[in-house]
Amino acid sequence: SAMGVAGPNSDLVNFSEYISKNFALYQLSNDGIQLSTAAQANFCRNELAAALRKGPYQVNILLGGYDKKTSSGSLYWMDYLAALTKLKYGAQGYASNFCLSIMDRDYKEGLTQDEAVQIVEKCIQELKVRFLLNQSNFLIKVIDKDGVRVVKFGADPADN
Amino acid sequence: MARRYDSSTTTFSPEGRLHQVEYAIEAINNAGTCVGILAKDGIVMASEKRVTSGLLAPAKTSEKTYKLSQHSACNVAGLTADANILIDQARLRAGRYEYQYCEPIPIEQLVEHVCNYKQAYTQYGGLRPFGVAFLFAGYDEHYGFQLYQSDPSGNYSGWKATVIGANNQAGKSLLKNEYGSQEEDTEEGKDGGEEMKTGDADKKLILPDVQEALRLAVKVLNKTMDATATSPDKMELFSMTLDTNGNCKHTILSSDETKEVMDSVDAETAAAGDM
């Protein structure tokens, strides 16, 4: 599984490293058992919730994973207030204003990987046209039974 | 000579032993027997109830079998008061795991947690160890149904079938001979391919189903208890199976149901005797 995290770099790095190392520790301590995507998401949310009334992590997260047991992928959306929901498609940040409409329209059940990537590319294109900030560099990652891999690079290969 | 090194849990003896821990393990050999058997569709745990009296108020809770979570339960042999503390620990751990991950705790993790707690009392604090041995039965999606045994030292191991408490050696030897063999003929060996004979790839252990396991458990208890004294109120039979939704079902058999199993065991041994 993989996590997309948005927020100030301090919390972003601290939180995501803390979470990923906890998952690694779980595997080591428990004979190689891996946490399911749902369990990972709930763990994450629990950490956010515990810190919320003390010193919140200002991170918004999209957690996607593939579970061999159910042979299916799942996507979880989490925000800095420790809300959690399972979604078919999602977005965090300003992108959501533009991208959700596109995904609302184009998403359907049983998309192939290529079709899904195309929709993501459509979203990126939309941002390039309509979004205030000029962000030329995007990274698309796919998570499936073979793990996590990068599909596309952004505009400037030197940045990747 | 060992006397000098007996009293403290935090001291090794010159032979490298922890006497207090060993004495705690001895204490359990006087406790009511518990037998646990792994079946292909569930787990069976049977125990000898020592505390029976007509004057006892009918209790909702058993002195032997305890539910730890939706998908795990345990049988106790030893000091019930000590066991209560550990059972609380186990229930807390299972609950906290589910709070954190919204998933049931994998059984081995639960067992390990209880055992680590027990181990602390063999190393720190100068307090005596817990005089309890457990049989843990549980189900998780990683390894299916599992049976674990733990003792006061904090050691645990997974079993297909095992006995703790009084006369456990007699029970274990019966299981050695009879676990895994089935009544119907199978292509492979009639003896059921029971032992872990090394290099014997053909002899795969055939797990019994829950009904057979219940009968086998009763047989074991018949052997470990006084044969004359066996009656449905002295035995507690527990089974754990999956229902159609994939949730665990914990069942403590009623007196009548227990009697049925005991009767069918008696009939079986009688028939075997005739041949």
Image: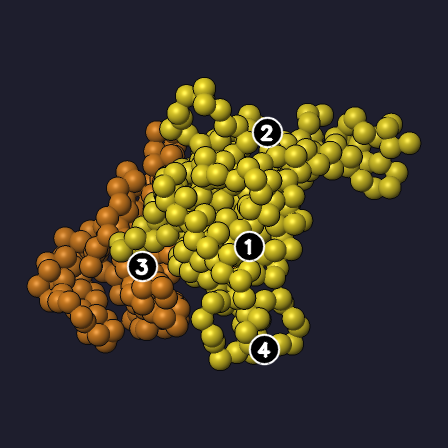
Pinpoint the chain carrying mark 4: B
Residue denoted by label 1: B161
Where is A121 relative to B62, above or below? below
**Mark closer to the observer (2, 3):** 2
Of all chains, the one bearing label 1 is: B
Please identify the quarter of the rendering in which residue A139 is found: bottom left
For chain B, give the colour.
yellow
Mark 4 is surrounded, within 10 Å at the Cα level, by few (under 14), some (14 to 19) or many (20 or more) other residues, namely few
Residue wearing tag 3: A64
Q: CA distance from mark 3 to mark 4?
A: 42 Å
Residue A112, position in %: x, y?
21, 74
Please state which of residues B146 and B29 is positioned toward the viewer in this rendering: B29
| Chain identity of mark 2 | B
Mark 1, mark 4: which one is toward the viewer?
1
Within-10-Å neighbours for mark 3: few <14, some 14–19, many 20+: many
Distance CA(mark 2)–CA(mark 3): 48 Å
Amino acid at circle 4: Ala
- Whether residue B155 sits left or right of residue B253 in the image: it is right
Q: Residue at the location (26% across, 42% down)?
A: A83
Question: Which residue is denoted by mark 4 in the rendering?
Answer: B201
Residue B262: horizontal and vertical position, in percent? 45, 47
Residue projecting furthest to the front: B274
Q: Amino acid at mark 3?
A: Gly
At x 68%, y 25%, the residue is: B127
The correct choice, above or below, for B198 with respect to B272 in the image is below
Which hue is chain A drawn in? orange
In the shown orientation, is residue B139 left or right of residue B203?
left
Q: CA distance from mark 2 to mark 4?
A: 42 Å
Q: Which residue is mark 2?
A: B79
Residues packed near mark 2 inside 10 Å, few (<14), some (14 to 19) or many (20 plus): some
